[in-house]
Image (cartoon, helix red, strand yellow):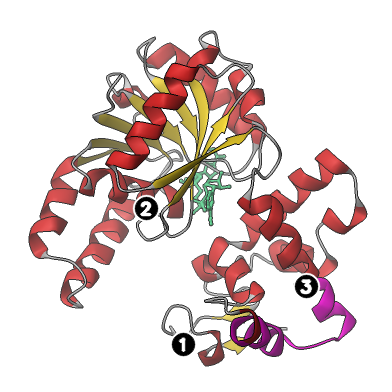
Amino acid sequence: MSINTVGIIGSGTMGLGIAQVCAQAGKKVVLVKATPGDIERPRGKFVGSLDKAVERGKMEAALRDTIIANITFTDQEEAVADCDLVVESVIEDIEIKKALFNRLEGICRADAILGTNTSTLSVTAMMAVCQHRDRVAGLHFFNPAPVMSLVEIVHGFETSDATLKALNAFCKEIGKAPVLVQDTTGFIVNRLLTPYMLNAIRMLERGTGTIETIDQAMMTGAGLPMGPFALADYIGLDVVIAMSQNIYEDVREGHHAPPHTLVRLVQLGYLGRKTGKGFYDYSAKPPVGNPALVHPVI
Ligand SMILES: NC(=O)c1ccc[n+]([C@@H]2O[C@H](COP(=O)([O-])OP(=O)(O)OC[C@H]3O[C@@H](n4cnc5c(N)ncnc54)[C@H](O)[C@@H]3O)[C@@H](O)[C@H]2O)c1
């Protein structure tokens, strides 16, 4: 089965990024805003970031125009009825995702593939609320989706070979490097990265180093493009805490539970870059990826 039309549910950080990737590869995209509110907000944010890329010489104006022309913004889930593939990218909450899959079954064609961009939740749990379980799989993009080439294709318990094959071909068509992974909490990357970020937070709590020194050490000593605190802010602390809770619930080992500082920051609404403050304060609008130029909050 070839995938030419893609529905995306959720117009947050990841939904917008995945929409861009698909649209710039020539796919027709229906992007659905999943929560009430003005559809012009995510649309304006999306077009604004493409305009900035054109102004900075990072994107041709013609490509921007193609991307915009290939995307239909809507707040109606029913608009994905004719899509070959629908990828949900709403908040990391299993009950919300299960309810969405249940509705999508009633909306989408029986041969459409239903994918989830979940970071850590069980694809099989979402599949379980569906009648046509063979066409459900994980399609886990990385942030920022237009830049990061990996996509984890997640094999749920009853995902068919035909679905996996179609998703593998699709990922290659949109310029991504897919890996196949079994449905285990956190898959490959987040199962390794989440404990790494939690360990850095515990190291901060023990006073081993500051936010800046720990980040700096991991960049200059381990050759990483950003340190664990800048990474956590980039991902979103609400997403990091959800990943931590999901892995902890699965394995019940204390070191996977969210550390105190992470819990408090999320309680205060300091979610990282998307809210302007997390471990760092971004109110001075620093350049992306340079934590040395922003102010640690803690
Ligand atoms: N941020 C990352 O680095 C990253 C990377 C890969 C995958 N993911 C996953 O992608 C998904 C979306 O994450 P994001 O980073 O785009 O988050 P985000 O906060 O930027 O966007 C969240 C989206 O969920 C919607 N939403 C919020 N409350 C909702 C509700 N009650 N019902 C339905 N929709 C609701 C919002 O409208 C928005 O579209 C999550 O499953 C996350 O785990 C995130």
Q: Residue at x 73, y 62 (%)?
A: 267
Q: Residue at x 60, y 32 (%)?
A: 96
Tell me: is circle 1 under 8 Å from ligand 1: no
Q: Residue at x 64, y 39 (%)?
A: 93
Q: Which secondary structure, mark 3?
A: helix
**Which amino acid, by three-letter code, is at mark 2?**
Gly
Q: Is residue 75 visible?
A: no
Instruction: Determine whether label 2 and label 1 are within 8 Å by CB.
Output: no
Disc number lying in front (2 or 1):
2
Q: Position of residue 275 (x, y in %)?
A: 53, 68
Give the magenta part as a residue range: 202-220
At label 1, counting other C-alpha atoms closer than 10 Å, the crowd grade (few under 14, some 14-19, many 20 or more) is few
**Which amino acid, by three-letter code, is at mark 3?**
Ile
Q: Is residue 152 visible?
A: yes
Left or right of 229 on screen, residue 226: left
Q: Position of residue 285 (x, y in %)?
A: 43, 83
In-front residue for pair 145/38: 145
Tag 1 residue: 284
Tag 3 residue: 201
Tag 2 residue: 17
